[in-house]
Amino acid sequence: MMRHLIVGGGPAGQCALQTIRALDRDAEISLVCDEPAYARMVLPYYLEGKIEERAVLTADTDWYAEQRVATHFGSRVVAIDPGGGSVALDGGETLEFDRLLIATGSRAARPPIPGLAGDGVVNMWTLDDAKAFLEKPRGETVIVGAGFIAFTVLDAIVARSEKVSFVEIESQILPRMLDATAAAQMAAHLEARGIAIHTGTSVDAIEDDGGRRSLRLGNGKRLLADAVVVAAGIQPNTELVAGSGITTGAGPGAGILVDDHLQTSAANVYAAGDVAEGFDLLTGEQRVHAIQPTAVDHGRVAGANMVGSDVTYAGSLTMNILAAQGLEACSFGDWAGDGREVHTALNAPNRIYRKYVFDGNKMVGGALVGPTLSVTGVNDVGMLKGLVQTGVPLGPWKAYLLENPLDLRRVYVASGAAKQLLASTLLTGSASAGGGFRFPALPPTRKRSKHHETLLEGKSAPA
Ligand SMILES: Cc1cc2nc3c(=O)[nH]c(=O)nc-3n(C[C@H](O)[C@H](O)[C@H](O)COP(=O)(O)OP(=O)(O)OC[C@H]3O[C@@H](n4cnc5c(N)ncnc54)[C@H](O)[C@@H]3O)c2cc1C
């Protein structure tokens, strides 16, 4: 009987575990995780008070018992011996495996800023971080880093703060997701709502000022805050492979190198999710894609291959989708489009921006900005993704799109992108079934959003 060991109970580990169980009813499965099993992606809803803590968790002890998984929660794997087929836990215990999956994710990077470890400074990466922020009294909040993660929690931070400011070292907000024009739309929208944005400057120190935090910026300014949220990038948790011979990428932020089967340089060891440096779907380059869809795909493909299937992963698509303060933004593939054929359309008063990047007749990247209330915008996010992901030749529909940049729908339907997407289903048979809801007793909250009122109760759009 095959013994599978999974390190990490985030989305990558959970998806691998479910896939292994779906394909092999008899396999022995063990899980080691230093945190409870949960999805970080839903932390913004928890922070906003929309869901309770148990809805953040993805499984409980009953579910693991049902799946016959031996769990070791609260333990860390500190060393791996691929040749001997064993791992060492921080408590001194040794666990043996035939196949190992490293799904240890990533952690919030801690830039070397004096005072960063002091009181009143939190990250926004773990459930404990979210709890620490909720314990702080309402006041002024400064967010260090205006990247994707900061924006996923922005609405929750605004709801719990008297004033919010961003400090971003790059010359624009969302520098790894949007171009300067799109970022300027987002920034103007936030500034109109009272959010202060300081770009192109560093935080050089965080000091105490009568019990409050005083941030000394590189441009000479000072900001006072009651809470500082640091969202300045991530670092894959690769330390456990030190000395194991398992290969990692080069440079800061490197992950564990995996092939198109999610196998590491050790034949019996796989890696998946934020910790893995897998292939990019469009460029074929190896890089860490620290997003949930990649973690899910990686976990499922790794799980299938660990039980002996032969599933090749085509690679993951660069994508970022967010909504903050009533404005949505997304980007896919080569959204920057440097050196490529790029077409843009801008309606600044309504904060609508579209960018399409082409390689000949194929769309290889794009970005959208638009109001959250716009149903067209919401639908188009998925269509843009489908066009970039499949790379279907657009034929005459490319010219049509350039003339009608707000009508992606006809292009999407006519190009047959949906059919192509069906063909890219990762796994077949029982392993392709969704996990379903594990907590059926949790009812949805009944509170209607302001968007519901606008759409269904005939009220005018909120400002
Ligand atoms: C606030 C927030 C919002 C986000 N929103 C989005 C979003 O909207 N869309 C999106 O695509 N992505 C989003 N993400 C990113 C997404 O959550 C991650 O990409 C995803 O969690 C990665 O899954 P994973 O399983 O690889 O790693 P993780 O979820 O990090 O899970 C890894 C687990 O392994 C544990 N672990 C680490 N080392 C060890 C060890 N040595 N021994 C035992 N256990 C260990 C970790 O503590 C952790 O519990 C968000 C993240 C955050 C924090």
Image: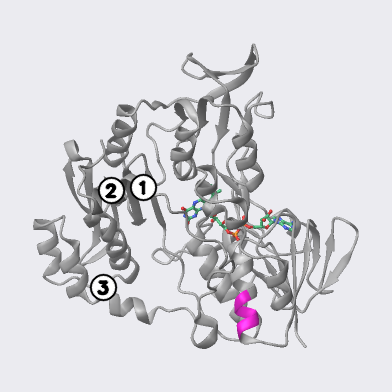
Q: Is mark 2 within 8 Å of ligand 1?
A: no
Q: CA distance from mark 2 to mark 3?
A: 38 Å
**Residue range (magenta):** 18-22
Quadrant where the C terminus is found in the figure: top left
Q: Is mark 3 within 8 Å of ligand 1?
A: no
C-beta proximity under 8 Å, tags 2 and 1: yes
In depth, the one of 42 and 292 nearer the eye is 42
Residue 434 seen in render? yes
**Ligand 1 in which quarter:** bottom right
Residue behind mark 3: 392
**Amino acid found under the numbered disc labelled 3:** Val
Q: CA distance from mark 3 to mark 1?
A: 37 Å
Picture layout, residue 114 above or below residue 460: above
Picture layout, residue 220 above or below residue 417: above
Q: Is mark 1 within 8 Å of ligand 1?
A: no
Q: Could you say whether the residue bearing mark 1 is in a helix, strand or loop?
A: loop
Residue behind mark 1: 449
Say few, some or many: other residues with alpha carbon within 10 Å of mark 1 (under 14 / 14 to 19 / 20 or more): few
Task: Tell me: 147 left or right of 232.
Answer: left
C-beta proximity under 8 Å, tags 3 and 1: no
Residue at the farthest right position: 92
Residue behind mark 2: 453
**Amino acid found under the numbered disc labelled 1:** Ser
Q: Could you say whether the residue bearing mark 2 is in a helix, strand or loop?
A: helix
Q: CA distance from mark 2 to mark 1?
A: 7 Å
**Amino acid found under the numbered disc labelled 2:** Glu
